[in-house]
């Protein structure tokens, strides 16, 4: 199964997450199919904290990819900021 989830990057105490499309069986930070966005939880007010390619998200959901609960929450948050 294909899932849309977060892959952690960054340094110790400075997390940065990529939103990736990956096979469910791969490791959290391992191989992925496509990177469709990012999430920076410690971004300041002047920096962008989240970016998601909505067209790619829609495509992957249409072909059966499942999203993690955290990614669902981030997508809703990004949609609220866009309006």
Image: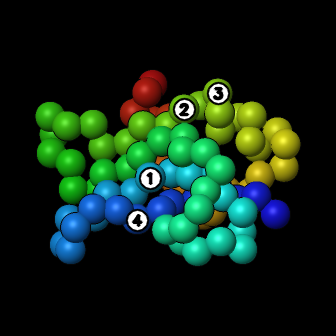
Q: Are marks 1 and 3 in contact (CB under 8 Å)?
A: no
Distance from disc 1 to disc 4, alpha carbons, whole Å, reads 6 Å
Residue under pointer 2: 53
Quick one: 14 or 48, which is closer to the camera? Answer: 14
| 71 versus 44 height, above or below | below
Q: Residues within 10 Å of mark 2 (few under 14, many from 20)?
A: few
- Classify residue 26 as left or right of residue 7: right
Give residue 55's mark.
Answer: 3
C-alpha separation, residue under disc 3 versus residue under disc 4: 23 Å
The residue lying at 72 percent from left, 74 percent from top is 25
Residue tagged 1: 18
Q: Are marks 1 and 4 in contact (CB under 8 Å)?
A: no
The C terminus sits in image quarter: top left
Q: Residue furthest right?
A: 63
In this picture, residue 32 sits left or right of residue 16 = right
Distance between mark 1 and mark 3 Cα atoms? 17 Å
Residue occupied by mark 4? 8
- Residue 3 at what x, y percent from top left? 70, 59
Q: Does residue 68 appear anywhere in the picture?
A: yes
Q: Earlier in the sequence, mark 2 or mark 4?
A: 4
Q: How far from the left and from the top, in percent, is residue 26? A: 65, 71
Q: CA distance from mark 2 to mark 3?
A: 6 Å
Residue at 85 percent across and 42 percent down: it is 63
Judge left or right: residue 14 versus residue 69.
Answer: left
Q: Are marks 2 and 3 in contact (CB under 8 Å)?
A: yes
Q: Quadrant of residue 16?
A: bottom left
Nearer the N terminus, badge 1 or badge 3? 1
Horizontal side, residue 77 vs residue 3: left or right = left
For the residues marked 1 and 2, what is the alpha-carbon distance in whole angstroms?
Answer: 12 Å
């Amino acid at each position: 199964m294909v899932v849309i989830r977060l892959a952690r990057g960054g340094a110790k105490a400075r997390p940065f997450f990529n939103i990736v499309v990956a096979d469910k069986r791969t490791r959290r930070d391992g191989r992925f199919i496509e990177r469709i966005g990012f999430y920076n939880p410690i971004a300041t007010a002047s920096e962008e904290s989240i970016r998601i390619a909505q067209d790619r998200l829609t495509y992957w959901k249409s072909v059966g990819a499942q999203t993690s609960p955290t990614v669902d929450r981030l997508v809703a948050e990004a949609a609220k900021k866009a309006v």
